[in-house]
Amino acid sequence: MADPASTNGGAGGVARRDWILMPLIGLLTVAAMGVASEQIVARIFPEEKGSLAPCLISNDPTTGVRGVPNSVCVVDQYESGRIEYRQNSRGHRAGYELEPKPAGTYRIVLTGTSAVYGDYVRQQDTFASLLPAVLERRTGRRVEVYNEAILGGTPRAISKRFSDIAAAQPDMILWVLTPWDVNYADMLVFAHHKPEQESLPRRIYHRIHDSYTANVLLFLFYRSPSSTLKKRLIGMGNVGDLDRVSSPAWNAHLHDFESAYASVQEQARLAGLPLIVGLVPSRTAATMISLGEWPSAYDPYKIDRDLAQIVHRHGGQFIDLYPGFAATPHAEMDYYELARHLNPEGHRLATRLIADKLLEDSPLAHLSNATAQGGR
């Protein structure tokens, strides 16, 4: 006869089947709560609708990613709302067609990647659209800013398409970078692949990470500056652009960037075109420098210094935007919490900081001074 304790657990014991049923019930409860939370959160925070993919040619390694001429894409995202992305006949989100430069007009061609393109922001609210009026008011000159930036417009892609920039008849090329540009300096096409070889735990992690609930928790978490730092710095993997001591991987990224930048700078020199480079900080870096404090293992200014040294080493000109972000209280609020890009307020901040630097020390500043003296 079976021992009652082995099946029923004895007095005050736990039956063997309960050791299976209790964890199973717990897992089912968690799963049911997860499904319920996904449904509730999906109603409160709608999923992003639409895509920019139809407006991009993202698989041509001879040119890098470029825009589809005369294409229009609409994306509706929780943080930004409904945004229309309209490309002109050259595939640029410039807001107008490129025409021969009118006499007396100072034309700036703006290049870069998604932050410069104006991802998650209406075209009229981007710093590409806001800069001309500010520069005209402060110089008394007619100024155009033609935006050739595109998602995935990496340094290597820009070096391959430099002839398109030169064909726009610029008086100045303005290249605004982000840390992403350094991380993916050599990329020419978007990688579209599923991690089939990932382990089961990694697949579960990605499924949770991409869920509605996780994204809403991240959104709420990012509302606090201190939480932003914790999220980025505690257990979230390599943050090479913020490390005080560069890792071999980050040094490799810097090497790739320098190679691509040197190519662009040399082409600009041969074409007789001034190339001005500036860096917009990541949201985490903006949080750090705005607060004026960060963990000792990190240095948010290091990438700014590194890129300035690279630019100067090749005879280029670098405008330092970091002091302006540092002087802005709670600069992290000028970024979207989840998208991590500049929001409309951030584009207005960037407009002011870029204009200040261009008028402080660039060919436009010298032209402005000459115009002012001529007016007296």
Image (cartoon, rainbow, N blue to C red):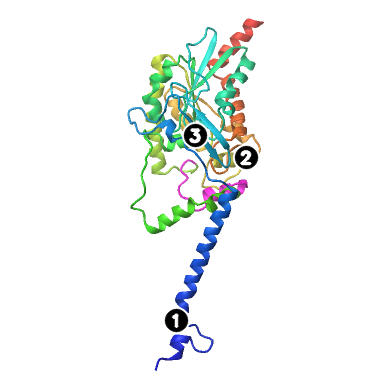
- Specify start and end residues of the magenta stretch as a single range: 221-241
Q: Does residue 129 appear to the left or right of 57 in the view shown?
A: right
Kindly indicate whether the residue at mark 1 contacts the one at mark 2 (C-beta within 8 angstroms).
Answer: no
Amino acid carrying label 3: it is: Thr
Q: Nearer the viewer, mark 1 or mark 3?
A: 1
Res 333 label: 2
Res 341 label: none
Amino acid carrying label 2: it is: Met
**Residue 343 point in image, percent of width and height:** 59, 35
Residue 345 visible in the displayed image: yes
How many residues crowd mark 3 within 10 Å: few (<14), some (14–19), many (20+)? many
Specify whether residue 227 is painted magenta. yes
Q: Quadrant of the C terminus?
A: top right
How many residues crowd mark 1 within 10 Å: few (<14), some (14–19), many (20+)? few
* Residue situated in front as seen by the camera: 154 or 367: 154
- Please tell me whether residue 221 is drawn above or below residue 171 in the rendered image: below
Res 178 label: 3
Amino acid carrying label 1: it is: Arg
SS state under label 1? helix
Residue 152 visible in the displayed image: no
SS state under label 3? loop
| Alpha-carbon span between mark 2 and mark 1 | 55 Å
Res 16 label: 1
Lower sequence index among marks 1 and 3: 1
